[in-house]
Image (tube, grey):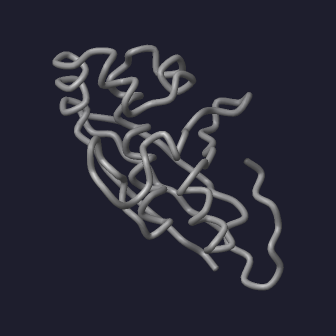
Amino acid sequence: MIYSGVDVVAVERIRRATARWGNRFIQRIFSPAEATLCNGRAESLAARWAAKEAVAKLLGVGLRGIGGAGGVAFHDIETLADAHGRPTVILRGAAQARADELRIDYISLSLSHDHGMAIAIAVALGSPLTRRRMPW
């Protein structure tokens, strides 16, 4: 089975949020490792926000906003980079449980930003017959 999700975010939206709420905003949305990787760059933060949304969409659930109910939490989906800089996904909590329900074996992630917009595309492969452990 193949699952997909895509999301696009205006970089200026993230830039305004970090200007208004600063580190408090970043800590509520991103893991310490994600924050370190992005190093305050609004384009990188926007791409990772879009990645969290795209992964939530392929899981068939929404993101549980700050104070909201349902879906998965922002910290349940972590987007880092491998040794070559390729985006990777780590699932925890409700996101991991949902991936297990769908028998997802692997999630591929692509991020980009240009002209004030950031985009993320997530594609997951699921095994309908044999349940294998995910790499995360």
Q: At x 43% / y 40%, what residue is drawn?
A: 112
x and y percentages locating residue 100 in the rendered image: 66, 67
Q: At x 68% / y 73%, what residue is drawn?
A: 103
x and y percentages locating residue 92 in the rendered image: 60, 48
Q: In the displayed structure, does residue 71 sit left or right of residue 101?
A: left
Q: In the displayed structure, does residue 74 sit left or right of residue 37?
A: left
Q: Quadrant of residue 113?
A: top left
Count up the numbered dots.
0
Q: At x 40% / y 24%, what residue is drawn?
A: 27
Q: At x 74% / y 28%, what residue is drawn?
A: 83
The foreground one among 86 and 22 is 22
The foreground one among 109 and 66 is 66
Q: In the displayed structure, does residue 100 sit left or right of residue 49?
A: right
Relative to 127, residue 42 above or below:
above
x and y percentages locating residue 110 in the rendered image: 52, 47
Q: Quadrant of residue 115?
A: top left
Q: Quadrant of residue 74?
A: top left
x and y percentages locating residue 91 in the rendered image: 61, 49
Relative to 54, residue 124 above or below:
below
Quarter of the image containing the N terminus? bottom right
